[in-house]
Image: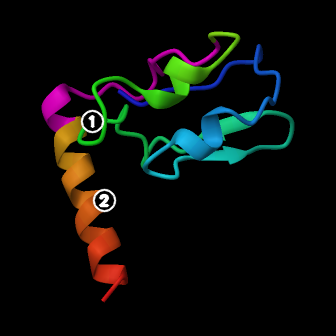
Amino acid sequence: MALIITDECINCDVCEPVCPNEAIFMGEEIYQIHPDLCTECVGHFEQPQCALFCPVDCIPKDEHHPESPQELQQKYQMLMQQKNSSNL
């Protein structure tokens, strides 16, 4: 499932640059995660980098976007295909 950034976010800017899918962006008040781009770092790392580096532990799984490990892997593969196609 995708991750979500909660209201406890302190806008420290640590999460955004470590996201390999560029799923994290600045919202109106705090950072947000685009669920269509979040793979929980499947295909890139063993664990989600944003949650790993977050100093206030405010990045849990988003219960509104449930996905199995297989679905996350498929999303990763689709995102990589799109990225490779745009680099041609």
Q: Amino acid at mark 1?
A: Val
Q: Where does label 2 land, which residue?
A: 79
Q: Is residue 84 above or below residue 25?
A: below
Dot 2, how many residues are within 10 Å of its Cα: few (below 14), some (14-19), or many (20+)? some
Q: Along the line of sight, which residue is nearer the eye, 55 or 10?
A: 55
Left or right, 88 with reference to 54: left
Say if the magenta span includes residue 56: no
Q: Is residue 36 above or below residue 11?
A: below
**Residue at x 35% of width, y 23% of height:** 47
Looking at this view, name the residue that lies furthest to the top. Answer: 57
Q: Residue furthest right?
A: 29
Q: Which residue is mark 1?
A: 42
Residue 51 percent coordinates (x, y): 52, 20
* Residue 69 occupies quadrant: top left
Task: Tell me the amino acid under the disc marked 2.
Answer: Leu
Element under disc 1: loop
Which image quarter is the C terminus in?
A: bottom left
